[in-house]
Amino acid sequence: MKIAGKVEVEDLPRICPLLSRRTNPRYGEAQTRVVQVGRVRFGGERPVVIAGPCAVESREQTLEVARAVKGSGADMLRGGAYKPRTSPHDFQGLGLAGLKILREAADETGLPVVTEVMDPRLVEQVAEYADMLQIGSRNMQNYPLLVEAARSGKPVLLKRGMAASLCEWLGAAEYIANEGSLEIVLCERGIKAYPSGEYSRYSLDLNVLTAVRAETFLPVIVDPSHATGVTAMVEPASRAAIEFGSQGLIIEVASDRLDAATPRCDAAQAISPRALRRIIHFIETRQEYIAEKAHVA
Amino acid sequence: MKIAGKVEVEDLPRICPLLSRRTNPRYGEAQTRVVQVGRVRFGGERPVVIAGPCAVESREQTLEVARAVKGSGADMLRGGAYKPRTSPHDFQGLGLAGLKILREAADETGLPVVTEVMDPRLVEQVAEYADMLQIGSRNMQNYPLLVEAARSGKPVLLKRGMAASLCEWLGAAEYIANEGSLEIVLCERGIKAYPSGEYSRYSLDLNVLTAVRAETFLPVIVDPSHATGVTAMVEPASRAAIEFGSQGLIIEVASDRLDAATPRCDAAQAISPRALRRIIHFIETRQEYIAEKAHVA
Amino acid sequence: MKIAGKVEVEDLPRICPLLSRRTNPRYGEAQTRVVQVGRVRFGGERPVVIAGPCAVESREQTLEVARAVKGSGADMLRGGAYKPRTSPHDFQGLGLAGLKILREAADETGLPVVTEVMDPRLVEQVAEYADMLQIGSRNMQNYPLLVEAARSGKPVLLKRGMAASLCEWLGAAEYIANEGSLEIVLCERGIKAYPSGEYSRYSLDLNVLTAVRAETFLPVIVDPSHATGVTAMVEPASRAAIEFGSQGLIIEVASDRLDAATPRCDAAQAISPRALRRIIHFIETRQEYIAEKAHVA
Amino acid sequence: MKIAGKVEVEDLPRICPLLSRRTNPRYGEAQTRVVQVGRVRFGGERPVVIAGPCAVESREQTLEVARAVKGSGADMLRGGAYKPRTSPHDFQGLGLAGLKILREAADETGLPVVTEVMDPRLVEQVAEYADMLQIGSRNMQNYPLLVEAARSGKPVLLKRGMAASLCEWLGAAEYIANEGSLEIVLCERGIKAYPSGEYSRYSLDLNVLTAVRAETFLPVIVDPSHATGVTAMVEPASRAAIEFGSQGLIIEVASDRLDAATPRCDAAQAISPRALRRIIHFIETRQEYIAEKAHVA
């Protein structure tokens, strides 16, 4: 039975000749191409930690969380100014005003900032304020947006679609590469499977990390916040992702002040700055552990 | 365990107050709002059949298939001028030239034409040539595109995302309604599940039709070509969809001339004009059967 | 990347040489081997309708429903005496007493009866009272049970596991064939996918019917009650299954007397005898339609 | 729309009153009940590592691997004497002869041994040779088998069904508890999802670990071999599982002698004794790290 459009990992050299290791022996079997955002190096010596609020809700809230994640040791700031929401009647983000707040928070803390762009006509605007553009899960196969993001000259954080195969994901990245930019960081963020909604929001798919790193030289990170949707899972998922080979994390953080307002998006998956600190401490300690482990293998 | 963003069918009146039956008692529990494209009436007395090539590849191929589907009794023409492809290196469609060919085929056959638009900046262009705009599965949650399509004044065919929940799908439709347009036709086109790729491309999900019709007054049709990905399944899937309450079909057809070129997209799911004729004959005969059945129930 | 245990439809001649069409050209490309249960012929000229209560709860309830399904025109009776339940604290069925009630209902109505067996040690007992043994979804890969059922000499109704691939399903059937029995009827009953629990219990997978019929000569039927889990979907799902090529249906029916007790299992998916009558009328009328269709194709 | 049999985590106190934390406050919110197999303590101070061949193929092969896993520091031995295979024509295991070999290997190495039982009639036989009984994924809802295993007096390793919900899994465990035994260890082993077969065999679902530990006091471990199906993923998956809170691992190991025969089952997911050693070293080193971490939080 011939199936239309059936794709296999074997097709990757054809789907993404620019990004497949098999057609780009330059990076060998294991080496990652480093993507640099300011001083932050994805695919470098150490996993990168991006953290911040789900959405920019106000100047105060954003600056508070930005200072907190800086204090916890994060490398980079995240926050949504344009928010893709299931309902048009839900909070859609502050837009341009949100971008300006993000820029201020980034400048004050010295952390580069990544934020989502959903509209090809706004790529230029978002690129003016952000250091890295995020393509969200819902837009992974929004090809005109990918092309525009590539042309902006900014590095792109490409989230995996919530039901994307490896071939579809790397094919989407190839649209960026095809515009001449290899400044791409991939991000696994949980997939839809039958358990979705029973005890977690999505199913964190760590297996894909090994496959990504075997098939392409792009760096890949994990979003434990969306991949679980449950605050209590974010810390263990973060450590697990690092152990599985993730080259970074992007985490939603909320203020833990007793009188802080509940976040307007995804409050049930936000962690505290203190929990973020523990995750970063884990990464730091692990680096020392790796150095030590060298004596065993 | 609280899960971020868990949505249930019970949330629909909040997610899509403009489209939910519960907040719009005007259409009662069963009535569908008719969406009209030329003389074609979605949600009217009879299921609508849209047919045509996967992609517009040339004037000759398109006119040939258009005449054939007209001859088979189809109500409307389909064909892709802008094609979303997994790889940027695959055929991307003829673009504007393709739109002009589609318009010619529509005018010659007298069939209204629907075609996909992927870029909000091209909505105006596509709307100039097409009678109905298709939002493809990959772009179901491309909200700026939905908004632009709504503003075009053209009716919209909104395909279900390949892993969209009912809430996400109706939420996407609500973005269109929120711009003031109720000219929306929904289209189930198969979902991603574990069997995908073993014996069919996607899993045809007919259960959702009953749910859609219970929750909203929008008409809903089925794409048996993508939902199966296998030519031999398209005919039975078409009949099954109609029996399950689908208010129409959108089907990919290819020439069955012995010397016709193989389609450049999805050849393994195309059916012949003769098979299309059988599907339409089934629908016609069934209408008579329904009239007769009235004596039984 | 080599994956352990990856199986493809291409492996079927190796997995099930006794049941694969490719290794058994005797049945050609389309012919089904008829499985006979009393006068009922699965894979014969007409789809078979099995109907009855989810569980045998009492003599009265069972006889009432049995008479009703007989009156509606069903070919065969179903009912559970041994019930596999998610919790051990839920009603587990009447066991032997239930089997005796089923036998009485079968004898009175003249309908052969199928019932589930879960324990290889009880196959002999169940086979004494039933005309056909059902292997439920949870036990599709309970190989000792399959072997024992095969040895009983009774025909077997083999439900698809709720996440079984085609290869796993036909491989399970092969265990029966390997004991020398080809008296096997397959039954699709819905699969687990991400929508499970949002608007339907499982996802009815009709695509698999074409694949089953292409790959093996065994008859295949559909269980629209479990595949939907929603009363309002059972009738459309039944008609759709028949149109997709299903060679029969197995349907849960409950009394519609106003003072009838609510069924102790799966009340939300039971249909009334009157709805069953409509389904059977559909099948009868369709046979005439097929005769007529012969003039068209 | 009412869905038959829809179960939610909220139903767990009803489904499994004996195993739910909410109905058994004795274990508090976080404490695990220790299950002891010889000197091995599941849910104790340290994660337990079970390792051994997929199947017992011969005395030599089994003893060699048993000695190797002992040498690598494993706590317990695994190996299949009765093998559930997709095809009846594939190697089915050595049966009783395999059990005797396993016992010999266990006695020689001093490691307790766990092995799968598939038939309630063989529980007594398997329990005579094994220290712990494994219920495999295919038989998770084989309730007569669960009951018989519970009555054997041996502790039970209950693998999660490959598409089991949390409720179904804990419900299955409750069948064992209902016979008076709490000697149950749960084992996550990968679920079926759309990526299955593209780059990994199943999708490792670590999110469920947090949910299991929140809802029940039973210990839970992970099978990284089946959950990935790819040798290169087993090591990272093992470390990730431990970081996510898994209380142990069960891993398939094969000889790495150059002249060793390829395993007859699942060769593509077996790791070497050397890789096993690295995993165990990770666990040991991590214990020290945890001690250190106490100073931070």
Image (spheres, coloured by chain):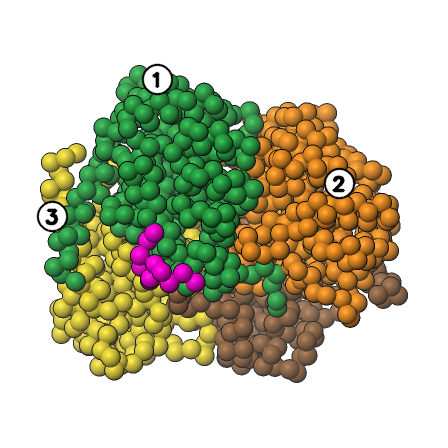
Chain colours: A yellow, B brown, C orange, D green
Q: Find disc 2 in the rendering and name its residue.
A: C130
Q: Secondary structure at mark 1?
A: helix
Q: Secondary structure at mark 2?
A: loop
Magenta span includes D154: no
Tell me: residue A293, above or below residue D244. Answer: above
Magenta span includes D29: yes
Residue at the image position 35 percent from the left and 45 percent from the top: D35
| Chain letter of the residue beneath label 3 in the structure image | A
Q: Residues in magenta?
A: D23-33
Q: Find disc 3 in the rendering and name its residue.
A: A288
Place of residue C23 in the rendered image (x, y in percent of width and height, measured from the top left): 64, 24
Residue at the image position 72 percent from the left and 53 percent from the top: C56
Quick check: marks 3 and 2 in contact, CB under 8 Å? no
Q: Is residue A265 left or right of residue A254?
A: right
Asked if one can make out residue C116 in the rendered structure from this viewpoint, the answer is: yes
> In front: D67, or D32?
D32
Tell me: residue C176, above or below residue B98. Answer: above
Mark 3 surroundings within 10 Å by alpha-carbon count, few (fewer than 14), some (14 through 19), many (20 or more): few
Residue at the image position 30 percent from the left and 43 percent from the top: D41
Amino acid type of the residue tagged 1 in the rendering:
Glu
Mark seen at residue B109: none
| Chain letter of the residue beneath label 1 in the structure image | D
Identify the image quadrant of residue D27: bottom left
Quarter of the N terminus of chain A within the rendering: top right
Q: Main secondary structure of the magenta part?
A: loop
Place of residue C103 in the rendered image (x, y in percent of width and height, measured from the top left): 79, 45
